[in-house]
């Protein structure tokens, strides 16, 4: 075979978008729709150790009004999110945060998700070399129903430093998804929920605002674990996969996909939150520090708020703060913050600070 | 966000049962029913290398009277077993053994298993600090059919050393499940079984009591392999997952779930036992020594006994001893026992000594 | 239990075939048919990061005329191929190559594949200690339809050095599968193919013969990754699994299954070949150097040829050369060959040189 073919090297590679490629109100249709079925669900359990009953057993799901166990909320989220990577964050310096994440419809076995994003904000940095892009992404199923909607913002490099700065538009983002806007399936009926299926005796009424739960379990995660998960999610951000490239960076090795940390913490937090049926919103979140292969992840939860769900006496909403900690048991970490030279920053072992909302059955009146 | 929330730290964590929490005839309904489907089955093959044809191919299963390939016996067992961990063995010092494990019904794709245990024996240790708890566990499917039943006994710590010792009750356990009590599906018909599908020419008639088969294959298992498996089984015993915690123990690292060793040995023993269709009983077993990530597992089989199955001319039962060996080929281990200072113990490389029963087609008369 | 059972050690182990066991026109029915379902498909994505849309989303597959997403071509190939290992290559010195690999029918979810091989060539080596065996293997589904056909040749040890040499027969193998013999499903209709689902704007018309595409992505693969894949494929060649045995060889450790390298390169080559719908042939291939756990794999593609497909205006065929490179970005490797002492050999970082053919939608006239 020829060995001089590189004379004709061409570029059919999509380099992704740089800061100057984004425009306000631009709509981006992301590639690679994905069908999520029983294989993905089993792998998700193997990768996270998830034990949330709604996603584990058809019998439980059916007792709550579902036809079958729905796809885990976070599995669907990571797959939907992964679609945005090649267009939104492949040239990102940093993922700055997300907000207003809404779980609008259950994802059923066999559903196919497609994701579209709209640019809702732009702000060039004062250095002129990069800027912040705000996008709202929506993932729909094969019936064109919106199943997920979220905002995230990322700092993206400029490729052409001479490109003019766009008009600065910073969207107003809600601090949280209010109870009256949570999507609770009409068919869901938790009136006959039996806590024996979870082994957890505490229901919505038993949780108090300000309460902190130190979840005892810890999970050591290898590079293989987190890359298997990230490939399952079809998130192809190189920094998770290419150890050779990453060895040349300050990190020195592959980074764990932050979304998988959310999944691990959610799985670990099952002990003490057994009856948190499903996630209905992520109000905001920060990946405070990176995680790497062989880190051991722990988590604690703080109850931030609790709400009635309009027109429902069977379930209530709990707004929770889930803190992920690496290489240190959750109860050993008093505060997520440290003060160095008068400045507050995250404790170096804190890897996640997530504000999210779950549905939980209430005690019968 | 607040960083002083731990003033309100509460305990919603279920600490599991200590020795004094168990009572004779106590019935415990275990949490987290689980639907087992095609995802779990594919993962099981990837994690073990299993090639048993009944679980590999619908065509073979159908030729034997099944509607489709049933769930691997051991996959079902590990999932059913995992349910008991939070209530029975989370505070265990040691898993001492199991007996009278019966595979009562095939597990079909999509079946949901729930497990219940009954305390059938209690014996406080003479030191007053722990005791042995015997439980019979039964796992049922969504049709309320019993699919698995087994006895195990574990040594459990006391939490309150002042709690009075219970009356000692030690159950009579059978040495093995007798042939006339094996559950053989009525629909199973092996009269037309074709050994070409397994590549193994030996049938029930060809095995002799006392015969030993050294299976040549070895398999190196990483921490990721065994933790993926154990998470798939939703067995949340911390000592398999939390390397940070385990580093402080005498083991110095995570322990491999012993049940997964059974699966690996069963998969490795396919060479020489190709026509062992399915497991109908585990008569007893011991995890002789711990296994860790990066161990290489080998196995040999001894034929302990062979039985006619009542009213069946197409299949017979073989009672087998499966010995798991680590880091040493099976044929290099002459005996499972060593004698040190006049005392017999297991050879330090022996990790499993299991007595189980399989069904195998017979030669046509 | 007895510890002297090895006195009765028997050999029920099938040692596989040695060179003298093969005969021209011999037909070998391989064991362990396998049903491929959604679990295998999800695992394949997790193990490779595959994003080819036809295999990712039912909606895309349906828009092209399929009932649902078909099984990935290479997943089916590896499973079909794995069946031949115990009979053909378990005593092989080397896998020398394959040719004339034809993908004859889509593999649908739930299909069961069985593989049969016919010996089509034999050539004893001049040293008298080994020989080359050529086999054509065909894999059929449960409807007895041929879904895959391929030729491979392996060098196999003789066990009995006194066995006479067979008559030398070396089959004529085609350099490639010609366009008019490619199997394109009648139901496939790419006239309405929408490149938005892949994110790749280039269609068949846009590729030029001689063009080289350096795919940017790299993927680091652990021993766990590749052994999980190889176990999923039920390929039980010991050198992939038994680290203890391999430590005694010149390699010093487990070898990665070469077929999995093909899959990784195919997945990595999605960037720049987004619209390559499916593989219809592998014309030839060489595993140029071994790969091991922790290698990082990169790939580049050269367009070897492009053909009309008879009677089709919607799709064309591209003949591609896919070169796998380890531990060195694709664009850093100018040539696959190096010259040492006047002799050309593969560059030591080149692990794969594969010649294959894909279908790609054409621009509407």
Image (cartoon, coloured by chain):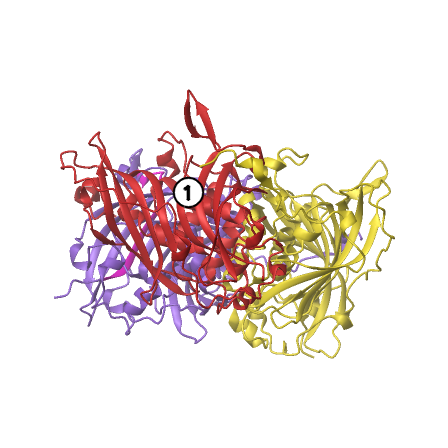
Chain colours: A purple, B red, C yellow
Residue lying furthest left in this view? A365
Q: In which quadrant will I find the C terminus of chain B?
A: bottom right
Q: Up-down: is B4 above or below C364?
A: above
- The question of residue C284 being in magenta is answered with no
Instruction: Give the residue at mark 1.
Output: B258
The quarter holding residue A197 reads bottom left
Give x and y (percent) for residue B18. 22, 41
Q: Is residue C153 left or right of residue A79?
A: right
Q: Up-down: is B242 above or below A271?
A: above
Q: Is residue A148 left or right of residue A214?
A: right
The subunit carrying tag 1 is B
Residue lying furthest front in this view? B365
Q: Residues within 10 Å of mark 1 (few under 14, many from 20)?
A: many
Find numbered disc 1 in the image and state the secondary structure of the residue it sits on. helix
Q: Closer to the camera, B153 or A250?
A: B153
Q: Up-down: is B167 above or below B335?
A: below
- The question of residue A357 being in magenta is answered with yes
Give x and y (percent) for residue A186. 28, 74
Magenta region, residue range: A343-360
Question: Dominant secondary structure of the magenta stretch?
Answer: strand
Give x and y (percent) for residue B224. 47, 44
Q: Is residue C319 left or right of residue C272?
A: right
Q: Is residue C142 left or right of residue A221?
A: right
**What residue is shown at x 64% (from left), y 66% (from top)?**
C278
The quarter holding residue B191 reads bottom right
Q: Up-down: is B341 above or below B8?
A: above
Give x and y (percent) for residue C293. 58, 42
Q: Closer to the camera, C64 or B216?
A: B216
The answer to whether residue B134 is visible is yes
Q: Closer to the camera, A133 or B129?
A: B129
The answer to whether residue B33 is visible is no
């Amino acid at each position: 075979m020829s060995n001089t073919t590189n004379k004709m090297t061409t570029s059919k590679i999509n380099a992704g978008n740089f800061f100057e490629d984004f425009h306000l109100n631009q709509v981006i249709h992301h590639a690679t729709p994905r069908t999520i079925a029983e294989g993905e669900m089993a792998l998700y359990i193997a990768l996270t150790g998830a034990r949330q009953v709604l996603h584990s057993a058809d019998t439980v799901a059916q007792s709550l009004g579902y036809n079958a166990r729905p796809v885990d909320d976070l599995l669907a989220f990571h797959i939907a999110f992964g679609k945005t990577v090649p267009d939104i964050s492949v040239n990102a310096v940093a993922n700055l945060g997300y907000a207003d994440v809404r779980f609008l419809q259950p994802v059923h076995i066999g559903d196919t998700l497609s994701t579209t994003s709209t640019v809702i904000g732009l702000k060039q940095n004062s250095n002129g070399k990069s800027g912040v892009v705000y996008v709202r992404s929506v993932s729909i199923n094969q019936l064109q129903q919106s199943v997920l909607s979220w905002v995230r913002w990322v700092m993206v490099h400029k490729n052409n430093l001479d490109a003019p700065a766009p008009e600065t538009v910073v969207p107003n983002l809600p601090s949280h998804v209010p109870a009256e806007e949570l999507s609770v399936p009409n068919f869901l009926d938790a009136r006959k929920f039996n806590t024996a299926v979870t082994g957890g005796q505490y229901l919505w009424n038993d949780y108090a605002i300000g309460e902190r739960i130190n979840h005892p379990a810890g999970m050591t995660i290898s590079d293989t674990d987190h890359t298997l998960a990230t490939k399952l999610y079809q998130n192809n951000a190189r920094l998770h996969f290419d150890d050779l490239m990453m060895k040349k960076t300050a990190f020195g090795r592959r980074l764990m996909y932050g979304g998988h940390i959310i999944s691990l913490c959610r799985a670990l937090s099952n002990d003490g939150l057994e009856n948190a049926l499903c996630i209905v919103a992520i109000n905001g979140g920060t990946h405070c520090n990176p995680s790497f292969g062989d880190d051991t992840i722990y988590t604690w939860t703080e109850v931030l708020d609790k709400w009635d769900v309009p027109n429902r006496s069977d379930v209530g909403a709990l707004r929770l703060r889930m803190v992920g900690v690496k290489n240190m048991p959750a109860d050993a970490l008093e505060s997520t913050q440290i003060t160095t030279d008068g400045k507050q920053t995250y404790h170096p072992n804190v890897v996640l600070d997530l504000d999210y909302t779950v549905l939980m059955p209430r005690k019968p009146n």
